[in-house]
Image: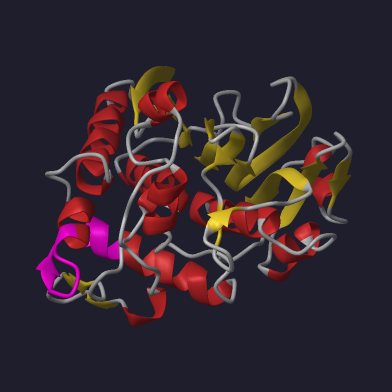
Amino acid sequence: MAAELHFPAMGTRVHVFVHGDPALLTFARERIEHLEHRWSRFLPSSEVSALNALSGRPVVVSEDTVQLVAAGIDAWRATDGRFDPTVLGDVVRAGYDATYDVVARRGGHGSSPLQRGCGDITFDRVTSIVELPAGVGFDPGGIGKGLAADLVVDELLAAGALGACVNIGGDVRVEGDAPDGGAWLVAIEDPATEHEIASVTLGAGGVATSTTARRTWTADGAAMHHIIDPDTGEPASTAVVSATAIARRATGAEVMAKAAVLAVQGDALDAIIRLGGEGLVVDRDGMVATSPGFSAFRTGHARTSEAVR
């Protein structure tokens, strides 16, 4: 038996597909909403908001939030700092200081004293204590959707699902059997037209897309977006409009995709490959390029992604 559910959460649209007991859809929705209430920087009561408000002091948080922070630090190290989960101050100064619907309508810049400092974050998995350096802010936006998809799919299978697919705003994790007993088909959209430009088949793995063409707004007549270059603290100026990565888990795919967008010119696909994934990138002229191993997923022969991050 198979069932699916669409609902809004984490500032985007969520699609959950379960091959198994339809009652598991209720669990999935409640779990994703629970993670949103722990991780959203727009909810004053969230654990991430508490960490940012109390930077410089130890804060007891849930195991979920420790895992979120640890994943962000791991990604920062793996990408040599190109992926930085402490760009919150830069994101706010660029104008993304409220939910996207508000920012898109209002535009403009924001104000924040927060600085970057990922290397000095500390956490303890035993005590569930996290401490941000004083004056440093943590932004879950770059990794939270992928991690949430991973957690929920893992938990759905542990609860008895034969297979599951969770898509949170384009960050997709699949595992187990698709409804027809075969592989999962994941479509990749052109960021400008929203038309499908490729589709991949996966027996198990994660797919994520990062793009500068969406979640945009205007400030002082200039187009702004939410992907921050940690070298400048400004929205990234890049020839890559969109990058899609395939990895073993959605968390890794999300990191790879952002690293590709932030890579030096001509290095986007190499950035994904170095992290153990395969990918597709679209440049500002609409040209599409893929990594050498991408075609194995595109041909319809289902594979389990071998990427380990």
Image position, residue 222 (x, y; %): 61, 37
Does 90 sit above or below residue 101?
A: below
For the point 69% across and 57% down, the residue is 260
Q: Which residues are magenta?
A: 53-67
Q: Is residue 35 visible?
A: yes
Image position, residue 58 (x, y; %): 12, 74
Image position, residue 178 (x, y; %): 56, 30
For the point 19% across and 68% down, the residue is 55
Q: Determine which quarter of the picture holds residue 133.
A: bottom left
Q: Nearer the viewer, residue 90 or 39?
A: 90
Q: Is residue 305 visible?
A: no
Does 79 sit above or below residue 19?
A: below
For the point 36% across and 25% down, the residue is 102
Q: Is 159 inside the magenta-drawn segment?
A: no
Residue pushed farthest front? 220
Q: Determine which quarter of the picture holds residue 282.
A: top right
For the point 26% across and 48% down, the residue is 39
Q: Nearer the viewer, residue 12 or 168?
A: 12
Q: Nearer the viewer, residue 125 or 2?
A: 125
The image quadrant where one finds the N terminus is top left
Image position, residue 108 (x, y; %): 45, 35
